[in-house]
């Protein structure tokens, strides 16, 4: 790939992941917020790269080239960006699953269906392997909770697919 047209990832202020990619003949900057990539409509990435200080008055020679602003952005490898993005996506999914399955889990506890073991869902998320265990959906890893996870694995898979996961497989053994 042309070096000028590669995707570049940035970490802004030590927490916000940004991406600069070549799309349709133009450079497009995006920020990862609330579990998805959004266009950088306010040019946050460009502003940090140029050292733009929005608090300096218009026409000030110090408005551009502010080293403090330039120090707030660092280029990071794709793997590190993917790990940070995955952390946010998985945190959002875990919160969703705990709420989504709460009532069904209560009903399951009243009349459990079957015990299981070694229940998990695996996938690739942003090119990195991820494993989802019973604790990730808000239950324990005892055999009855693993049986419950088996009953909701199709929904877990659908949520992972909606988040961009690929090669999704679920496992489990009735005990």
Image (cartoon, rainbow, N blue to C red):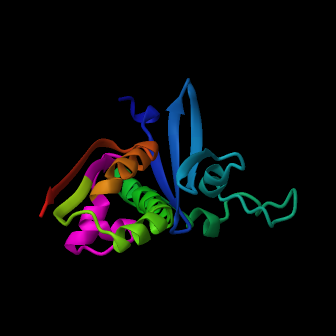
In the rendered image, the quadrant that contains the N terminus is top left
Residue at coordinates 62% horizontally, 57% vertically from top-left?
Answer: 48
Q: Is residue 148 rendered magenta in the image?
A: yes
Depicted 54 relative to depicted 37: above or below = below
Residue 93, image x and y in percent? 45, 59
In the image: residue 56, left or right of residue 86: right
Residue at coordinates 72% horizontally, 57% vertically from top-left?
Answer: 64
Residue that sits furthest to the right in the current view: 58
Residue at coordinates 56% horizontally, 68% vertically from top-left?
Answer: 13
Depicted 31 relative to depicted 117: above or below = above
Q: Is residue 13 rendered magenta in the image?
A: no
Residue 130, image x and y in percent? 28, 56
Q: Is residue 1 visible?
A: yes
Q: Quadrant of residue 173?
A: bottom left
Instruction: State the residue in front, 146 or 91.
Output: 146
Residue that sits furthest to the top in the current view: 24
In the image: residue 171, left or right of residue 148: left
Residue that sits furthest to the front in the current view: 111
Depicted 36 relative to depicted 15: above or below = above
In the image: residue 69, left or right of residue 170: right
Instruction: State the residue in front, 62 or 141.
Output: 141
Residue 87, image x and y in percent? 41, 62
**Bounds of the magenta span?**
122-149
């Amino acid at each position: 790939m042309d070096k000028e047209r590669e995707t570049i990832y940035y970490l802004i202020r030590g927490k916000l992941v940004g991406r600069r990619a070549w799309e349709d003949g133009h450079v497009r900057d995006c920020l990862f917020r609330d579990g998805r990539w959004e266009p950088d409509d306010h040019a946050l990435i460009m502003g940090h790269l140029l050292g733009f200080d929005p608090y300096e008055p218009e026409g000030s020679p110090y408005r551009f080239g502010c080293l403090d602003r330039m120090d707030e952005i660092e280029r990071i490898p794709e793997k590190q960006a993917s790990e940070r993005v995955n952390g946010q996506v998985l945190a959002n999914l875990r919160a969703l699953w705990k709420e989504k399955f709460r009532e069904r889990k209560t009903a399951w506890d009243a009349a459990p269906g079957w015990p299981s073991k070694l229940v998990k869902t695996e996938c690739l998320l942003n090119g990195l392997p991820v494993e989802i265990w019973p604790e990730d959906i808000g239950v324990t890893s005892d055999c009855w909770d693993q049986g419950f996870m088996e009953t909701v694995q199709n929904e877990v898979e659908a949520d992972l697919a909606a988040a961009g996961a690929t090669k999704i497989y679920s496992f489990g053994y009735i005990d």
